[in-house]
Image (spheres, rainbow, N blue to C red):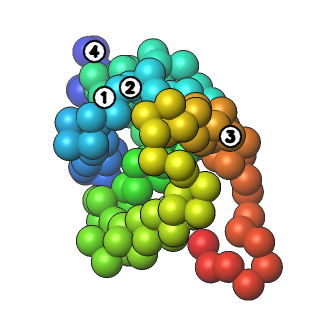
């Protein structure tokens, strides 16, 4: 007897839509997000294409890097603004304003991305 197709998990479908939206609006390439996550671009592509049917640990890292909460979608604007303020403050302390320096800082951030994504617990005193 043929197997009935399993209906898609609404949480996975919502995460897929939110990640597609993030990539389109932020102009982040699949390759760049994958590099930050420490996975291959094909993992991102397979998830976006519906070939990955569940939220694996790698997919969870991708979603976290994109600021997507699997339960509610993209983080609230106030949470994103709080995070952006922290990044802007750090950037203001080190960036000299040139394009070359901007590229160097971007390369450094991308290089440390896989290390950050493997972090399992927040430091003491920091909420997750």
Name the residue tied to disc 3. Answer: 112
Categorize mark 4 by other alpha carbons within 10 Å: few (<14), some (14-19), many (20+).
few
Residue 66 drawn above or below residue 24: below
Q: Earlier in the sequence, mark 1 or mark 4?
A: 4
Q: Residue at x 30, y 59 (%)?
A: 74
Tag 4, which secondary structure? Answer: loop
Name the residue tied to disc 4. Answer: 1
Tag 2, which secondary structure? Answer: helix
Outermost residue toward the right in this view: 124
Tag 3, which secondary structure? Answer: helix
x and y percent of residue 118 in the render? 71, 46
Name the residue tied to disc 2. Answer: 30
Looking at the image, residue 126 sits to the left or right of residue 123; the answer is left
> CB of mark 1 within 8 Å of CB of mark 4?
no
> CB of mark 3 within 8 Å of CB of mark 4?
no
**Rendered image: mark on residue 76:** none
Between marks 2 and 1 in the image, the one whose residue lies nearer the viewer: 2
Between marks 1 and 3 in the image, the one whose residue lies nearer the viewer: 3
x and y percent of residue 30 in the render? 38, 25
Q: Residue at x 64, y 46 (%)?
A: 117
Q: Earlier in the sequence, mark 1 or mark 3?
A: 1
Q: Residue at x 48, y 52 (%)?
A: 64
Q: Earlier in the sequence, mark 2 or mark 1?
A: 2
Between marks 3 and 4 in the image, the one whose residue lies nearer the viewer: 3
Which of 98 and 87 lies nearest the eye of the viewer?
98
**Rendered image: mark on residue 48:** 1
Task: Indicate the quadrant containing the C terminus: top left, top right, bottom left or bottom right.
Answer: bottom right
Looking at the image, residue 84 sits to the left or right of residue 116; the answer is left
Categorize mark 2 by other alpha carbons within 10 Å: few (<14), some (14-19), many (20+).
some
């Amino acid at each position: 007897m043929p197997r009935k197709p399993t209906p898609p998990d609404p949480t996975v479908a919502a995460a897929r839509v939110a990640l597609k939206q993030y990539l389109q609006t932020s102009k982040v390439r699949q390759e760049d997000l994958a590099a930050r996550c420490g996975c291959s671009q094909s993992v991102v592509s397979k998830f976006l294409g519906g070939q990955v049917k569940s939220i694996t640990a790698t997919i969870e890292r991708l979603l976290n890097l994109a600021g997507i909460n699997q339960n509610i979608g993209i983080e609230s604007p106030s949470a994103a603004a709080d995070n952006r303020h922290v990044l802007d403050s750090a950037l203001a302390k080190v960036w000299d304003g040139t394009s070359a320096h901007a590229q160097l800082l971007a390369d450094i951030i991308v290089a440390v991305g896989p290390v950050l994504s493997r972090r399992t617990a927040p430091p003491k005193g920091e909420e997750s």
